[in-house]
């Protein structure tokens, strides 16, 4: 899956010029493409459960989980630790999902028009993510404060919740596949002719239920990213209820995650112009990933810290916190520079002077920013994003390897994304892309 994030300077331009109803294209060889798809389809679901089990029941030790699987056999061992979805889990998931869907539809927000789609459509959104984020956190904390609902229940049923999400989200992706065939929401849809590719990459670019409920906004933003923040708070509260206090390591982890998610919702309308929304279709890769992978893998450092509180001390805790905040700010400023550059058509100031720019294409001119953060490398914004993840993970220190899985995964994901983006733009723009790369020679 792809975590919500900013694309390169050329990604939006590339997405806006794909032939109408074109099926998803890949930049890797057919063998690599099929191998990666089948591997992710088969391995990601059990990995989510194994990660939860290792974090919560195996003291964070990969060795202990491995010994369990070796002793009982992989299939029997996995079956023994895989919790079945319970009614409590389904109630929590549907309650949260319905609450977020209601906020998405009912809260006021400014009208925002996304980039022109491959078929010439202009998706229209209601930008109310920041309001929904504030209402969600205030409601969640209020339910706990006034004794109406204890967030520790979510942690206590976490395995069952992940299990329900694994199965439920898979069924949801089947629904998206069928919908794309029989009732697409727009002309930005189509089939590759291959069932596996259509299920994995998706059939529709902008699937909606009715006129106003955008499915990708819900899965990517209002469920995936919102659950990240809610679970970060949940882990903090669970540690408090277990120990009567919250370790400074957990406070740093929770603060940095919440700052990052706040930044995301502050910038949500910018996300609607990225690869995730404007190029990648709604299939297993995006939707299952945001519904399952984000709330499990992305929150895993906090999940680990619940049972492994670390006392960093004021100086180290503050140093990690400030370093993380700086990285999140630089990541935000990268996006801000590019958005301002696009909004003013290049007539703005970047680092106190007129921006350097180049042009992409003959029939349609697309300005590309080549100064500021974007003059350092074509995907420089990925650097502070990876470092941000490192700084909200490092409070766990280094007793176990597993808390750092997310950082490693994110690094691999972003390097692959940078390659996909560059290869796509190179094949689309030819000599103009080479001119751009000559001005900004470094990829990352």
Image: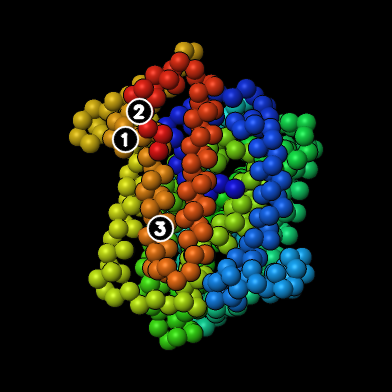
Do residues under tags 1 and 3 come within 8 Å of each other at their CB atoms? no
Q: Which residue has dot 1 on it?
A: 376
Residue 177 in sight here? yes
Residue 132 coordinates in the image, percent (x, y):
49, 58
Spatial CA span between label 2 and label 1:
7 Å
Q: Is residue 74 left or right of residue 349?
A: right
Q: Check disc 1: other Cα within 10 Å, few if <14, some if 14-19, many if 20+.
A: some
Nearer to me, 41 or 267: 41
Residue sitting at x 50%, y 78%: 307
Q: Secondary structure at mark 3?
A: helix
Residue sitting at x 45%, y 86%: 243
Query: Outermost residue toward the top?
Result: 362
Nearer to me, 102 or 411: 411
Q: Secondary structure at mark 2?
A: loop
**Residue 121 numbered tag:** none
Residue 102 in sight here? no
Q: Which residue has dot 2 on it?
A: 440
Q: Quadrant of residue 388?
A: bottom left
Q: Which residue has dot 3 on it?
A: 390
Spatial CA span between label 3 and label 2:
26 Å
Residue sitting at x 37%, y 32%: 442
Nearer to me, 394 or 358: 394
Nearer to me, 348 or 280: 280
Residue 97 coordinates in the image, percent (x, y):
62, 61
Do residues under tags 3 and 2 come within 8 Å of each other at their CB atoms? no
Spatial CA span between label 1 and label 3:
21 Å
* Position of 391 relative to 212 (above/below): below
């Amino acid at each position: 899956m792809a975590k919500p994030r900013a694309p390169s300077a050329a990604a939006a331009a590339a997405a806006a010029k794909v032939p109408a109803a074109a099926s998803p294209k890949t930049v890797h060889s057919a063998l690599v493409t099929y191998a990666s798809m089948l591997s992710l389809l088969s391995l990601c679901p059990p990995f989510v459960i194994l990660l939860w089990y290792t974090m919560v029941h195996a003291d964070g030790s990969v060795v202990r989980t491995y010994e369990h699987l070796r002793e009982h056999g992989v299939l029997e061992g996995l079956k023994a630790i895989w919790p079945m979805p319970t009614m409590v889990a389904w109630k929590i998931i549907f309650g949260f999902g319905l609450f977020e869907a209601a906020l998405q539809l009912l809260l006021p927000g400014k009208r925002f028009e996304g980039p022109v789609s491959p078929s010439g459509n202009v998706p229209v959104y209601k930008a109310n993510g920041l309001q929904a984020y504030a209402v969600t956190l205030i409601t969640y904390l209020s339910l706990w404060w006034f004794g109406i609902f204890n967030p520790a229940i979510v942690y206590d049923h976490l395995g069952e919740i992940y299990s329900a999400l694994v199965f439920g989200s898979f069924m949801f992706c089947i629904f998206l596949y069928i919908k794309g065939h029989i009732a697409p929401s727009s002309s930005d849809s189509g089939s590759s002719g291959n069932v596996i590719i259509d299920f994995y990459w998706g059939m529709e670019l902008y699937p909606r239920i009715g006129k106003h409920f955008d499915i990708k906004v819900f899965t990517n933003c209002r469920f995936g990213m919102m659950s990240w923040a809610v679970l970060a708070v949940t882990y903090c509260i669970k540690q408090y209820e277990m120990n009567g206090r919250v370790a400074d390591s957990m406070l740093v982890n929770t603060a940095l995650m919440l700052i990052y998610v706040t930044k995301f919702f502050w910038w949500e309308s910018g996300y609607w112009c990225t690869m995730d929304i404007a190029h990648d279709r709604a299939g297993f890769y995006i939707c299952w990933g945001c519904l399952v992978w984000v709330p499990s893998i992305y929150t895993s450092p906090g999940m680990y810290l619940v049972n492994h509180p670390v006392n960093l001390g004021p100086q180290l805790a503050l140093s990690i916190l400030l370093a993380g905040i700086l990285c999140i700010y630089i990541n935000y400023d990268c996006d801000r520079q590019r958005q301002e550059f696009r909004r003013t058509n290049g007539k703005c100031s970047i680092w106190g002077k007129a921006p350097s720019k180049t042009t992409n294409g003959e029939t349609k001119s697309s300005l590309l920013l080549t100064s500021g953060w974007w003059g350092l490398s074509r995907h420089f914004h990925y650097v502070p994003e990876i470092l941000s993840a490192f700084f909200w993970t490092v409070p766990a220190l280094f007793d176990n390897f597993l808390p750092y899985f997310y950082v490693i995964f994110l690094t691999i994901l972003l390097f692959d994304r940078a390659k996909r983006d560059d290869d796509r733009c190179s094949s689309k723009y030819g000599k103009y892309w080479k001119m751009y790369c000559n001005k900004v020679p470094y990829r990352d």
